[in-house]
Image (tube, grey):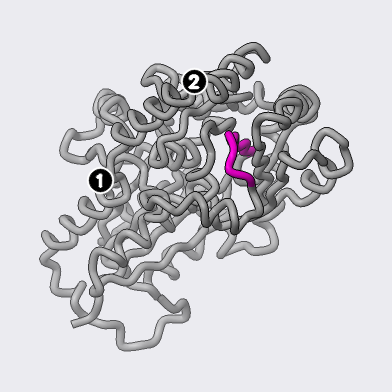
Amino acid sequence: MRKKRILLLSEGFGKGHTQAAHALSVGLRQSSSDIITRVIELGAFLHPTLAPWVFSAYRRTVTSQPRLYGMLYRNQYDKRPSRVASLVLHRIFYSQTKAIIKQLKPDIIVCTHPFPSIIVSRLKRAGLDVPLFTVITDYDVHGTWMDSAVDKYLVSTPLVRERLIDCGVSEKQVEVTGIPVHPNFRKAHSKEQIFAEFGLKAMPTVMVMGGGWGVFKKEEKEQLLTYLASWSQDIQLLICLGTNEKARRQLLEEDAFRQPNVHLIGYTTEISKLMDISDILVTKPGGMTCTEAMAKGIPMLFYSPIPGQEEKNCSYFQENGFGQRITSLEMIDHWFKLLLEQYPELAKRRTNIREFHSDDAQNCTKAIMQHLEQMDNPSYNQASSKTPLIQW
């Protein structure tokens, strides 16, 4: 009897979608030795030369023209992808998706980005007989996620579920599971070991994140980061710049960021550990980063949310008491003084956030595992007679 195969499709517009796919992949493999998974960023896989240009253009648009991006987001907010848009997307970028699915023969396809979900939905309407689960990785849902061919939506909150139902999705098709996070974010690491591993001091610590790309706009660097650095005598700053090595080198040239308690951190796979020793997170309200922070129980301060999904995320986190949007430098003063003078109160808030956050990766895993158990299609138990061109 062959192992069950789960294909997780994401896209490289930001890091959160793929992080969710990998988190779910790990959770599924840990749940059963009879499951194998494969995570693919579909556009980058099919077009390794073109995709970086597309992602770069997207990054420049959302960082330099946020109002334009917000206008486009709101204009399409309640609109499902049209058949024409789906066809164009398929013909230009994803025409080989059917061949990939045929080679891999998955038992279930899970999408963590709307573009692969659109493409697989189109293939299902054309006859593809593979269950499609779509994991929505924000705290709101845009129209591009919605398609009648999706078998099950796994969503972050009851409000997202209600919105899908209001837009015509059947109640049976939507399950509230939360956004999956990697198991590392559900572990408690030794703070003493982390301080030693990264050469850090055991003192009040604030983590600053610029998203997966580590992008800080000029005004954010000159105003926000420089002001945060002015607190470095009393507070240790961990400024995470992701893959943006250029930005890290530029900051290293400035005196404000060459202080002993200011640490400029490049790409790392140890964010979960750094969150364990951080008392406050200053970040853009991306769905994945904030979900990971909630798993660790860190109070959050939000800056420059991108109009659209980040603004929706920001509203959700503020309304539920998980953080606040930075509206003035005085707000930073308030939180940093709270950290220095009333730490027990901040620690209590952290405990409340952690207790609110459910075991999301396990909830998503359980939903998929339950569907696997219900499947009764003999063809799923037949191993491929040929070795696929793409290996699991």
Residue 77 vertical position relative to residue 116 in the rendered view, above or below: above
Residue at (30%, 70%) from the top-left corner? 5
Query: In the figure, residue 162 lies in which quadrant?
Result: top left
Q: Is residue 15 magenta?
A: no
Q: Nearer the viewer, residue 169 or 345?
A: 345
Q: Bounds of the magenta span?
A: 201-210
**Residue 209 located within the stretch drawn in magenta:** yes
- First in sequence: mark 2 vs mark 1: 1
Query: Disc 2 marks which amino acid?
Result: Gln
Residue 31, given in percent of the width and then of the height, sits at 24, 64
Q: Are marks 2 and 1 in contact (CB under 8 Å)?
A: no
Residue position marked by numbered label 1 in the rendering: 152
For the point 41% across and 49% down, which residue is it? 185
Q: Residue at x 69, y 52 (%)?
A: 266
Numbered disc in front, either 2 or 1: 2
Residue 46's x, y, as percent?
A: 57, 64
Q: CA distance from mark 2 to mark 1?
A: 45 Å
Residue 342 is tagged as 2
Q: Quadrant of the N terminus?
A: bottom left
Q: What's the residue type where badge 1 is placed?
A: Lys
